[in-house]
Image (spheres, rainbow, N blue to C red):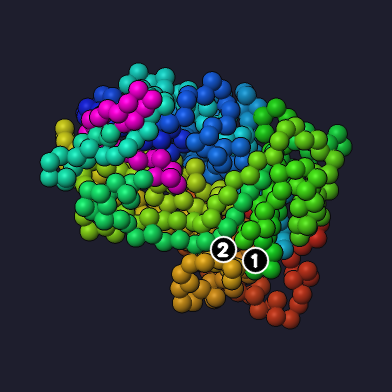
Amino acid sequence: MNTPGRRFGRAVVIGGSMAGLLSARVLADHFEKVVLLERDPRPEGPVPRKGVPQGSHIHVLLDSGRRVLDRFFPDLFQHLQEQGAQLIDSSGDVAWHHFDVWKPRYTSGIPLLLCTRTLLEWNVLRRVVALPNVELRDGYSVEGLLTDTARQRVTGVQLKSPGGEEPLEAELVVDASGRGSRAPQWLEALGYGRPEEEQVGVDLAYTSGLYEPPANFGGEWSALMQYPAPPSTWRSGFIGSVEGGRWLVTLNGYFGEHAPTEHEGFLDFARALPRPDFHAYLRDAKPLGPLTTHKVKHNRWRHYERMARFPEGLALLGDAVCAFNPVFGQGMSVAGLGAELLHECLCEHAQRSPGELEGMAERFRKRLPGILRLPWFVSTSLDLQYPQATGQRMPGLGLLHWYIRRLLERTSRDTAVHAQFNRMLHLQAGLGAVLQPSVSLPVLAHGVRTLFVPLRDLANTDTLPLHSRSEPG
């Protein structure tokens, strides 16, 4: 990969999770020095960290995110596979039940990574800290932003460690510190006010653990996903094959209906899923350790792009800006796309204004929403089908929900419709993929037929489908 020469001095990245690691990798192409700040001690292997409470749970890397990682770490996926990770076909190797129907199984050509979050993050961390101009400082927290005397430019951060406080100057500060970002408080203290926040409340919790697959498991899928059918059901379950020949099992529940952390109760929760298949596979699996729970009260988008005033030298991305419902597996991929956009803005700015950063962070701030709108729309539109969910409901939402339901029902029989839906889901295409006539006309026709014919006669609702090895047609 051809990278530009380094044109700037020091950059600081707050947060050593995936968004921060990808930001540091991007900045290493443009800055003489990149300092990556992380409160947790550096892990000695692929193990969970306190600062990533969601790290023990199942994660999905969409194809858009995979492409970003492949661009900046060309050998990553080969090495992950050597360590037991799998790159599977996102349709052919996945048994997926959603909106009361099974999705078709065929060779889509869209890969999906299966491994633990800890294995992926550990491998990315090793590559980032191996870069000669990247320094990881663990055990540090950021207490505030440093600015010039006019408070118009961020010039660094104020660090806190067990040894005391110290300033760290930088030409660019990137906040990738996740949901707990303190940027709103810092900006308010500097006189900029706080960003508007858009929230959709779901009171979600997901409980996860590692299992040994049952001896009689035939390998008929690499991942099993059972999503709910809003608004009537709100439990979901996921089994993914991960390194070590293990299953990573996650059970989710909305609105306070959360899976227990003891194995018998966990199995009972699985038994209450709308379909019996998940429980049938899990009941003979062997627990390999404790179960852990992580709670997410809401999706949240902090609209920094709407702020009338914003300091130079500060960029935010990942969950620090937009934190999605993790059920839809968008977070890591959107963080990757944000880091890629930061790279593009730095490259473009270098061509316009060689040797200076004035205006670059502002350009990034204004362009980031172009990446966030589609995944935010998809996840919140699905969540707002529940009357219990809190958040602003726009006019016409009921019609949109009708179309979404008919679309997802149609995917059970129509691989061409499903292929376009899959492209949108993996952020390869926008909403136009599922609104074009080749999709909308079959979906609308299906919607009309459901007025007269039961869904079970129109869709694949009963039998867990096998991989047909066919192509979308």
Query: Of the residues shown, which amino acid type is indicated by label 1?
Result: Pro
Residue 208 located left or right of residue 271: left
In-front residue for pair 327/344: 327
Q: CA distance from mark 2 to mark 1?
A: 8 Å
| Badge 2 vs badge 1, beta-carbon distance below 8 Å | yes
Q: Position of residue 261 (x, y in %)?
A: 71, 44
For residue 402, above or below residue 64: below
Residue 135: image location, x then y, percent = 36, 22
Say which residue label 1 marks. 230
Residue sitting at x 65%, y 75% = 447
For the view shown, which residue lies furthest in the right direction?
Answer: 216
Residue 331 in view of the camera: yes
Residue 235 image-quadrant placement: bottom right
Residue 376 in percent (x, y) is at 47, 57
Q: Which residues are magenta?
A: 159-181
Q: Residue at x 38, y 21 (%)?
A: 131
Which of pointers 2 and 1 lies earlier in the amino acid sequence?
1
| Residue 160 falls inside the magenta stretch | yes
Q: Which residue is mark 2?
A: 382
Residue shown at the point (58%, 49%) measured from the top left: 295
Q: Residue furthest left?
A: 150
Residue 317 horizontal/vertical position (percent): 38, 45
Crowd band around label 1 with a 10 angstrom C-alpha radius: few (<14), some (14–19), many (20+): some
* The N terminus lies in quadrant: top left
Label 2 residue SS: helix
Residue 389, magenta (yes or no): no
